[in-house]
Amino acid sequence: MEKLPFNHHIIKNDIGYSLNLSGTTIDVEQWEKQLTQLPPLDLSTYKAHIQHFKAYRNHYFNEYGYLWVEPERIRLAGLWLEHAYALVKFLIKKNKKAEALDICQQINQIEPDDERTMKLIIKLYNEMGNVDGAIRMYERYKESKDAMN
């Protein structure tokens, strides 16, 4: 039997088996802990916030259709989006529109049908003078709305 690279114990119980991972580093727990430990968002800390935002690569167990994952996936996605929108709002307020647009585009990669992000991208493209980009995003937004109806 091959030894796994972490401490584990398989426990038989009344309903089947469970895996005890005590002492094991779990990336999603680290991500959430680091999120709660970020300093308040200001000009001296926003790059740390961006770095943490970018550490979120995709939704929890996104590639699997496990029903038991859904509540945790929704909770973590909510934390991520809340942080992302606070970051975008801060960047827009500080006139860092290119960085705000970059965050919005990264949100859009993970949440391609998020209406709020699409509207922000259109707004930022317009404010930055990228009319073609705004039109492309508006057309995509319209297609998404039409598909829902």
Image (cartoon, helix red, strand yellow):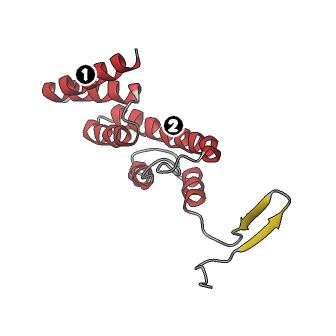
112, above or below 44, in the image = above
Determine the residue positioned at 29% across, 30% down.
Answer: 121
In the picture of the structure, the residue carrying the numbered disc 2 is 82
Q: Quadrant of the N terminus?
A: bottom right
130, above or below 18, in the image = above
Determine the residue positioned at 41% across, 33% down.
Answer: 89
Q: Position of residue 20 (x, y in %)?
A: 73, 68
Choose between 68 and 31: the one closer to the eye. 68
Circle 1 crowding by C-alpha within 10 Å: few under 14, some 14–19, many from 20: some
Choose between 1 and 148: the one closer to the eye. 1
Total labels: the figure holds 2
Q: Secondary structure at mark 1?
A: helix
Q: Quadrant of residue 136 in the image? A: top left
96, above or below 37, in the image = above
Q: Which mark is residue 138?
A: 1
Determine the residue positioned at 46% across, 51% down.
Answer: 63
Q: Secondary structure at mark 2?
A: helix
